[in-house]
Image: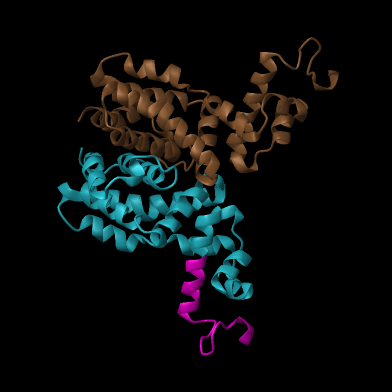
Chain colours: A cyan, B brown
Amino acid sequence: MSNVRRRPGRRPGSADTRGEILTAARRVFAEKGFDKATVRGIAREAKVDPALVHHYFETKEGMFAAAMQLPITPDEVIPLLLDGPREEIGERLVRMILRVTAEPETREPMIALMRSALTNEQAAAMFREFITNALLFQVADRLGVPHLRIEAAFGQMYGVIMGRHVIKLEPLASADPEELVELVAPTIQRYFTA
Amino acid sequence: MSNVRRRPGRRPGSADTRGEILTAARRVFAEKGFDKATVRGIAREAKVDPALVHHYFETKEGMFAAAMQLPITPDEVIPLLLDGPREEIGERLVRMILRVTAEPETREPMIALMRSALTNEQAAAMFREFITNALLFQVADRLGVPHLRIEAAFGQMYGVIMGRHVIKLEPLASADPEELVELVAPTIQRYFTA
């Protein structure tokens, strides 16, 4: 077992090592997308033996699924969106997404997810199931919003984040977050209201 | 020269052969994205010799740039958007984009472009320059709309098309075009108006 230890005193089964592998996985997936990322590359990035990565996550798909639930898990997002005045949900949602995507550490896994979903059918299916059943429909159903309307809102935020951080359209890429909240929040609010 | 002819009587330099190569390039780029598409693969798809593809398009990038200007060229789109009541521009734009993306033949090159822009920095730069300077800013400047607002509108339509045709979120993927016009056109109109 000593060959998979990173430092004396850390057991392969510790939550910390698993967390470090997931951090590395998010970085490698964000950089390479799903198809080109490898268990070996993620192990190298995490400075652990590939066997240890396989021990925690049987497949690359399994590792991707675990990695994609961060940095936003539905359990965290849904209460934040629902907790507050209904007429401010657009503002809360836009501000939350801009905040989560502002820092590379939290943005990279989301971008990796979006990128994989566009180039790999299996990742697209995972993303599709995750985003609708675990997140969008949960919020929509609690608020009585039709699924099509929340998907239009998703489309708005998806496009803004891709334009801002991946395609890097200017002035969108450099726009002040509060200016974007002012511009986009009424769109989201309308989808949640009308 | 006979080895590059597809049928007797067609010269390698004819506009028709070039058009057929571009059609094949759009299909291959849409299927494989930019990185994985090859000149050889496009030549095979077009049933011509790879040397002929190189004759028309020195590089894969050159071929991509030529292919990406179809099916919507700015020269066609801009007058259609500007021709008509200003208060209906949102509706015109949404209806046009839904129409162009409804058929696989016209949708595939746009999807290929979007996909490449997410996985390849050179393609991202091409897409970025094309979409802003040749299209969005042309429309915005003629209408006196700030660039940030037209990019928010672009984000909305980008996200809707990706959600509908690539991630295939339901009910968005199967929604009636006129229902989507009704839902999304007011968003676009607001960006062009307020």
Residue B53 seen anywhere in this rendered image of the structure: yes
State the image quarter where residue B108 is shown: top right
Residue A80 shown left or right of residue A113 in the figure:
left
Which residue appears farthest toward the top when viewing the image?
B9
Residue B68 shown left or right of residue B149 in the figure:
right
Q: Residue at x 75, y 17 (%)?
A: B12
Residue A5 is inside the magenta segment: yes
Query: Relative to residue B48, is residue A69 depicted above or below?
Result: below
**Depth order, front residue of B116/A187:** B116
Q: Residue at x 63, y 74 (%)?
A: A51
Residue A104 is inside the magenta segment: no
Where's residue B166, x and y in %?
49, 40
Where's residue B123, x and y in %?
54, 39
Query: Relative to residue B96, is residue A115 depicted above or below?
Result: below
**Depth order, front residue of A152/A162:** A162
Query: Relative to residue A136, is residue B134 depicted above or below?
Result: above
Query: Which span is picked out in magenta?
Result: A1-24
Residue A100 shown left or right of residue A82 in the figure:
right
Where's residue B43, x and y in %?
72, 30
Residue B114 seen anywhere in this rendered image of the structure: no
Query: Relative to residue A143, is residue A109 depicted above or below?
Result: below
Which residue appears farthest toward the right when viewing the image?
B2
Q: Quadrant of the N terminus of chain B?
A: top right
Q: Quadrant of the C terminus of chain B?
A: top left
Q: Residue at x 24, y 46 (%)?
A: A181
Q: Residue at x 81, y 12 (%)?
A: B8
Where's residue B171, x and y in %?
39, 39
**Depth order, front residue of A129/B152:** B152
- Label count reads 0
**Depth order, front residue of A119/B67:** B67
Which residue appears farthest toward the bottom when viewing the image?
A9
